[in-house]
Image: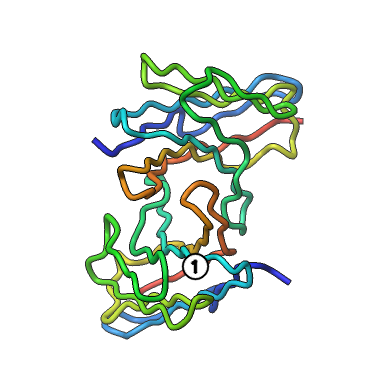
Amino acid sequence: QQQVKQSPQSLIVQKGGISIINCAYENTAFDYFPWYQQFPGKGPALLIAIRPDVSEKKEGRFTISFNKSAKQFSLHIMDSQPGDSATYFCAASSRSGGFKTIFGAGTRLFVKA
Amino acid sequence: DADVTQTPRNRITKTGKRIMLECSQTKGHDRMYWYRQDPGLGLRLIYYSFDVKDINKGEISDGYSVSRQAQAKFSLSLESAIPNQTALYFCATSVTSNEQFFGPGTRLTVL
């Protein structure tokens, strides 16, 4: 299975709150799990990424939590700000899959001021 | 200047017309990709190219063709556009297939 399932489709969070977006995958050959952030009218841009040999990666207010046994990973945005309002895509790729990247369906995040 | 550029940014066309979307990059990357984005479906891979002589179909290549004219240029063609090809199209580049760098997108409407 090549799918990457992402939830929720949309999310509204108060300023200062924690935003959590979840993804699940089936293909155990995936070895790179990026998150992309897309603002309206722009192309997606890499936000943060993780490999399955670690369970967590943090960059500023953004943290990826990775559960290899459950085949799930999530993005946590701490102290969410209105400027974080964007669409977020999780993704996965593998060397054995020819390095093709499979994207989740996306989550539209709105942070209320 | 943008590293990955796409032209046109917006296009409205009619069913049956031939359309070409162009992508140019100044990043010097060998790998280039074409995706389409639809609400609720995320980004789906149409075609990808790992160098000028290498072209590969993605998951939704039917109705599309591509041309890799040079390392820096990768064009997507719709030979006979149909309404369900209305979407946002993105070109991307990469060195390996880890981080991809996306262009600003082309919004295509087929009437």
Residues packed near mark 1 inside 10 Å, few (<14), some (14 to 19) or many (20 plus): some
Pinpoint residue B26: horizontal percent, then vertical percent. Answer: 63, 72
Question: Which residue is nearer to you in this view: B39 or B6?
Answer: B6
> Label 1: which residue?
B107
The quarter in which the C terminus of chain B is drawn is: bottom left
Pinpoint residue A94: horizontal percent, then vertical percent. Answer: 37, 40
The quarter in which the N terminus of chain B is drawn is: bottom right
Pinpoint residue B73: horizontal percent, then vertical percent. Answer: 50, 78
Picture residue at 62% right of the left edge, 53% below the top: A40
Picture residue at 34% right of the left edge, 81% below the top: B14
Dot 1: chain letter: B
Question: Which residue is nearer to you in this view: B105 or B71?
Answer: B71
Which residue type carries mark 1?
A: Arg
Picture residue at 40% right of the left edge, 53% below the top: B38
**Image: B74 above or below A74:** below
Q: Can see residue B61? A: yes
Pinpoint residue A28: horizontal percent, then vertical percent. Answer: 31, 28
Picture residue at 43% right of the left edge, 83% below the top: B69
Q: Is residue A4 left or right of residue B16?
A: right
Q: Is residue A87 left or right of residue A28?
A: right
Name the colouring of the figure: rainbow
Q: Can see residue B111? A: no
Secondary structure, mark 1, is strand
Question: Which residue is nearer to you in this view: A89 or A13?
Answer: A89
**Image: B85 above or below B40:** below
